[in-house]
Amino acid sequence: MRNIDKKSLVIFEFWKKKNILFEKKFKDENNLIHIFFHDLMKYFSSYIINLESNDVKYKLINFPYLNKDYAKKPYKISHFPKIKQTRFLNTLFFRINCIVAYFLKKIFGYRIFLVSKKYGYSINLRKLFFKGLFSGKFILINASENRLIKDYSDQAKLLEECILELCIKLKVRNKNIFTKNFINYIGVYSKFANDNFYNFIIRKSDFLSGTTARTINRIHAINFRNNKRKVIIISHGFQDLRILDDPITAYAEVGPADYVFSYGKGKLKFGKYNKPIKGQDPKYIYRTSDTINNIYKNKIINHKILDDVKILYVPTAFHGGQRYGPFRDLSDKDYLEWQNKLISIQKLTVKKHPKDQVLIGHNSHAEINKMPLLEASNLFDVFIIDYVSTASAILFATNKPIIYFDLGNQNVNPEVLKVIKKRVYYFNYKNRNISIGSLKKDFKSYNQNASKKINYYTENYSIRKKNMSEIDQIKNFLSTGNI
């Protein structure tokens, strides 16, 4: 395990213990650690990573992500990004929708769901809205974004003490400034007046979200749970949430929820690090990804020699300084160096990631493809990946060969990794230097490989045998509450 991952796990365990302390002391889920767990992980793991990084220097633009200068010597932050106030017309529209929904509930028995903004969903929300309105007897309403948390002055002092304690443990310079900056940051989320209308509609509805990794979604979710209403996560990624044994799954992606719609057969068990933290133990519901089901034909993979084929390399995003851990970080500098080595010895096209945070100049010989992956994948014969993600789930579902260079910056569930190795041509660079010579040898090994590859991944982790589309399965659940 890499040093930055070990240190990030120390941070994770620290905040897990403090979360238990806060739950006992403040009794409900509405405590500062529960709400800002992901932000605290970003803040402290970003500190560790930047302190040890040889990456280029980025400006400090998206607190609580840090940069190298701040990590070396924390300084006072005077201004934090403001949360936009909802415009008057949007607020009016929200209230009208809620009033209509309330009457539908009273007269026809409709269920009401407030929905987080379009962030992290893998289904068509508009389609789900009309299905609910005309055949499901439920209505979806976009949640207003300016209904935030209660007064936390009674908790802020204890949180400050906890942050200082971890600062001492990590030997953070200017620890008082480092601490105050975070306390001031969370203050941004407590400057909205209480809204009785919002409080009323919460008690009459449930909450639907694509993820609670986003702080505002987490706040909504906790508000609903404290009012004894249900929180439902419709996960993204086209694959089982447990494929990565990563703490972020437990503390953020499925956060404070009652139900989580994941993918596949649902046979994966929790790993060492993605077990639910205290107070978060949702019920998982498994579904087939309609997107993956449309791609998948059969298990057999057709091997192709690289000489006369079109190759698409599908990397993950360049983060532009938005770095955190554990099990996900690789500096832009190192990642670009790796990609340029790859490009220099093998003719291929680079698929530009839609969420790249910075513009990166590749080797001048690189051909860049900006098409959506679902379209681009039809134009190529062989794929190269170095990251298990939504993109890889799409590529796994094809019957085309995949070369997987494992750079060691993820913690894939060991059971899943065995299944992946049966699907792909796997080359392990976790403890191995990347060189032109080693890559040439790997490509030669691929060309000479006579072993048959079989795709067990898709049927285990992306689809399940059931004659129902995912949107209809979700619609039926929202209509009745029955699985």
Image: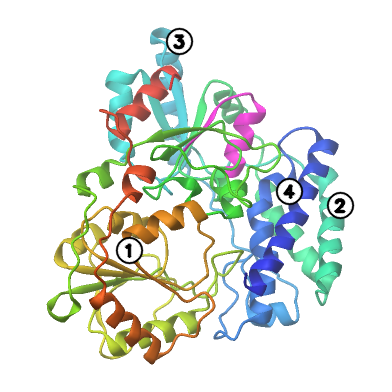
Residue at the spot 35% in from the left edge and 17% down from the top edge: 137
Q: Is residue 12 above or below residue 204?
A: below
Give the labeled residue for mark 4.
Answer: 33
Mark 1 to mark 4: distance in Å? Answer: 40 Å
Residue at the spot 47% in from the left edge and 73% down from the top edge: 407
x and y percent of residue 256 in the render?
61, 38
Give the labeled residue for mark 2.
Answer: 157
Q: Quadrant of residue 435?
A: bottom left
| Eye-nearest disc, 4 or 3 | 4
The secondary structure type at the circle numbered 3 is helix
Q: Tell me if 47 is positioned left or right of 205 in this view.
A: right
| Eye-nearest disc, 3 or 2 | 2
Q: Quadrant of the N terminus?
A: bottom right
Q: Which mark is residue 303?
A: none
Which amino acid does the dot numbered 3 rest on? Lys
Residue at the spot 55% in from the left edge and 44% down from the top edge: 217
Which amino acid does the dot numbered 2 rest on? Lys
x and y percent of residue 60 in the render?
60, 75
Q: Nearer the viewer, residue 139 or 261?
A: 261
What range of the chain is rendered magenta? 218-233
Which circle's residue, 2 or 4, is located before the other in the chain?
4
Give the labeled residue for mark 3.
Answer: 106
Mark 2 to mark 4: distance in Å? Answer: 12 Å
